[in-house]
Image (tube, rainbow, N blue to C red):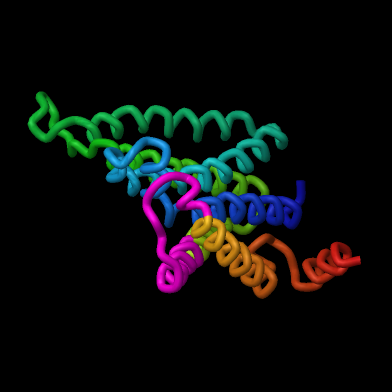
Amino acid sequence: VCSSDLRKVFRGLVLASAAFAGWLSPWSENIVGLFLGNAYALAGPVLSIMLLYPVFQTIAQIDGVTLLAKGETRAYTAVSAIFMLVSVPVTYFVQAPPNAHPLGGFGGGAIGMAIKMVCLALLSASAQSWVVARKNAWKFDWGFPFVAISATLFLGYTARSIMALVWHIPSGGFLTLFPSFALFTLMYGTGLSLWIWRFPRLIGMEGSEIHQMADGLLR
């Protein structure tokens, strides 16, 4: 595995998982209401947070496979074990009520658990990425996940806001929601495609490579 190949895989898959979050996050309340009923509509923010979890799981899977492929089983086991052990007490303090004895917690509930899972996934994935970069004398690409998440969420919420100005977004069943969701998906997909075309390094490619790929698809 060389640095350039891993960079393409890393950026491409991370952007794909971030694009999924940016696509569904603006509709989290609608999705919860559609599948669980309006009584659970307040769980929308929990779903929005948890949609970020696959982004960091993607990073962890890529880096974990890279470490195992290079025979760095000790480093992989050490990072995994540390964060598994840390997760238990952190879960307690997030979930325990403030008046619990002998140690009180934050009583975070569902949203607290979602934040905890995403934050620990972020730290674990970053630790694995740092180990991979250090073991191979590669640049630690720590900032890209935040760029991908910020870009896709901005694009998603912007597309929904623009669409809401020109199209009424109904609350109800799938058939009433589908037309507005389909229009949003078209806007979001177009914007994301233009963004990747303008900034091909978002998927780890150079401009010449993406132009060559486009020419091959159009032939």
Q: Residue 85, position in %: x, y? A: 38, 28
Q: Nearer the viewer, residue 205 or 43?
A: 43
Q: Residue 201, position in %: x, y? A: 67, 67
- Magenta span includes 155: yes
Q: Residue furthest top?
A: 101
Q: Quadrant of residue 213?
A: bottom right
**Magenta residues, dominant SS class:** helix
Which stretch appears magenta?
Answer: 153-178
Please tell me how many numbered marks the rendered image carries: 0
Q: Quadrant of residue 131?
A: top right
Q: Residue 22, position in %: x, y? A: 50, 57
Figure quadrant of the C terminus: bottom right
Residue 142 visible, this orientation: no
Left or right: 171, with 78 as reference point? left
Q: Residue furthest right?
A: 219
Q: Nearer the viewer, residue 9 or 156?
A: 156
Q: Residue at x 67, y 48 (%)?
A: 136
Left or right: 218, with 56 as reference point? right
Name above or below for residue 141 compared with residue 31. Answer: below
Q: Residue at x 36, y 32 (%)?
A: 86
Name above or below for residue 31 compared with residue 107. Answer: below
Residue 56 visible, this orientation: yes
Q: Nearer the viewer, residue 158 or 154?
A: 158
Q: Residue 68, position in %: x, y? A: 67, 33
Q: Nearer the viewer, residue 185 or 216?
A: 185
- Magenta span includes 71: no
Q: Residue at x 69, y 68 (%)?
A: 200
Q: Residue at x 52, y 43 (%)?
A: 54
Left or right: 76, with 213 as reference point? left
